[in-house]
């Protein structure tokens, strides 16, 4: 009887182990390096939990808006952070090496010397580092950020540090086909672009130059959508990325409880106005709110002004915006990893 019991316990343990696995993701983004540890209970059923998520803030994309390259010192810092956290995933979390993915975001990929970064990481980790194109990144975002039932009536827009990307799916011959949209402007690159126009470098001057640049920004986003006219016809707009996270957090002071939380266009306008004209309110609120404090540690005032102007403008130019639903997709930061893992298992509805 005891032997039979041991056998049953061993069988249960084996069954659990065969389903529950840890996966690690390291994403080198324009604003920093993001680490995610996923505990996947069942690949086929898409059951997973975010075990850990943390960020090391490194403004690696600063040089892109200046001379089109990643600065050498930023590359060295990024490599050091990646190596440290790769080792942490292997030793502290006991993640199998084959289950760790390292990627560079499309914003980082805009640099002319991105290969210097990826080659150094491969030399130290023996892992290939994929530079995700804005098209692939947007497709992974759609699959990881939007509920499958809403794939065909939604568009996703992600504002990163180096660029803005997104897209939508359309059914063609009974298959979901992905159509990307993108613009080469993001929070970091817009901040640097406006800073270049400022002589005195004050926030007041930054606001003035930002206002003067808005027609160009509207033109950029209008072109992004009109290149794919069907992107303007979707009923649901999902927003993700650092700009969306900062807006939601400063608005509510909490972490979103749901993966997809409704927000309004007026919410974005009110937060933008505070960033531009009453930033001290954020500072005072952050003294007693850890979530808001995290935002202010990640973004300085000029970054927030740039982020919220991007967020407002990318929605403003969509026709009939007042009749559309806006959702904050809180899992945007891990969408690529979720998509990587479940695509490998072919466990999600395929979007080509």
Image (tube, helix red, strand yellow):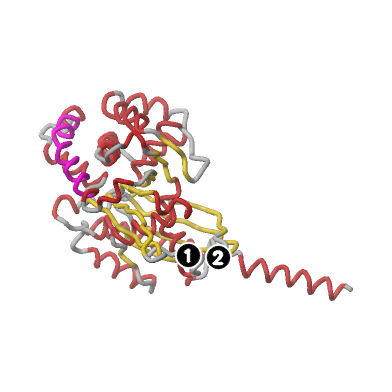
How packed is label 2: few (under 14 Cα within 10 Å), some, or many (20 or more)?
Answer: some
Question: Residue 76, which numbered label?
Answer: none
Magenta span includes 218: yes
The quadrant in which residue 310 appears is top left
Determine the residue positioned at 21% across, 53% down: 227
**In the depicted view, which residue is nearer to us: 328 or 87?**
328
Q: Distance between the residues labelled 1 and 2?
A: 8 Å
- Report helix, strand or loop for mark 2: loop
* Residue 323 placement, left or right of 349: left
Determine the residue positioned at 49% across, 40% down: 256
The secondary structure that dominates the magenta segment is helix
Query: Which residue has dot 2 on it?
Result: 43
Q: In which quadrant will I find the C terminus? A: bottom left
Magenta span includes 118: no
Question: Residue 341, which numbered label?
Answer: 1
Give percent across and percent down for residue 282. Answer: 37, 28
* Residue 49 placement, left or right of 278: right
Residue 106 seen anywhere in this rendered image of the structure: yes
Determine whether label 1 and label 2 are within 8 Å by CB: yes
Give percent across and percent down for residue 112. Answer: 18, 62
**In the depicted view, which residue is nearer to us: 12 or 313?**
313
Q: Which of marks 1 and 2 is nearer the N terminus?
A: 2
Q: In which quadrant will I find the N terminus? A: bottom right
Determine the residue positioned at 55% across, 65% down: 43
Which segment is the magenta one? 206-224
The quadrant in which residue 17 appears is bottom right
The quadrant in which residue 127 appears is bottom left
């Amino acid at each position: 009887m005891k032997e039979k019991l041991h056998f049953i316990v061993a069988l249960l343990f084996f069954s659990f182990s065969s389903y529950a696995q840890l996966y690690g993701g390291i994403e080198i983004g324009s604003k920093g390096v993001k680490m995610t540890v996923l505990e996947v209970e069942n690949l086929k059923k898409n059951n997973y939990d975010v075990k850990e998520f943390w960020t090391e803030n490194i403004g690696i994309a600063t040089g892109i808006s200046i001379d089109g390259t990643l600065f050498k010192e930023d590359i060295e810092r990024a490599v050091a952070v990646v190596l440290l956290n790769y080792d942490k995933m292997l030793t502290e979390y006991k993640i199998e090496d084959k289950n760790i993915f390292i990627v560079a975001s499309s914003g980082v990929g805009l640099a002319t010397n991105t290969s210097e970064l990826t080659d150094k990481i491969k030399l130290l980790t023996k892992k290939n580092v994929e530079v995700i194109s804005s098209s692939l990144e947007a497709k992974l975002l759609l699959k990881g950020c939007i509920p499958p039932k809403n794939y065909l009536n939604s568009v996703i827009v992600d504002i990163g540090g180096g660029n803005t990307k997104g897209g939508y799916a359309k059914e063609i011959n009974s298959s979901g086909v992905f159509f990307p949209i993108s613009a080469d402007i993001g929070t970091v690159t817009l901040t640097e672009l406006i800073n270049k126009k400022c002589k005195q470098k004050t926030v007041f001057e930054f606001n003035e130059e930002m206002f003067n640049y808005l027609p160009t920004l509207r033109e950029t986003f209008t072109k992004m959508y009109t290149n794919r006219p069907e992107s303007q016809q979707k009923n649901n707009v999902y927003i993700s990325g650092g700009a969306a996270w900062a807006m939601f957090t400063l608005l509510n002071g909490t972490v979103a409880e749901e993966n997809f939380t409704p927000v309004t266009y007026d919410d974005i306008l009110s937060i933008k106005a505070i960033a531009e004209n009453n930033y001290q309110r954020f500072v005072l609120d952050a003294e007693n709110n850890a979530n808001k404090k995290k935002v202010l540690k990640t973004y300085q005032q000029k970054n927030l002004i740039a982020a919220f102007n991007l967020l407002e403008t990318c929605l403003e130019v969509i026709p009939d915006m007042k009749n559309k639903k806006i959702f904050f997709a809180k899992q945007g930061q891990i969408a690529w990893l979720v998509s990587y893992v479940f695509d490998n298992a072919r466990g999600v509805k395929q979007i080509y």
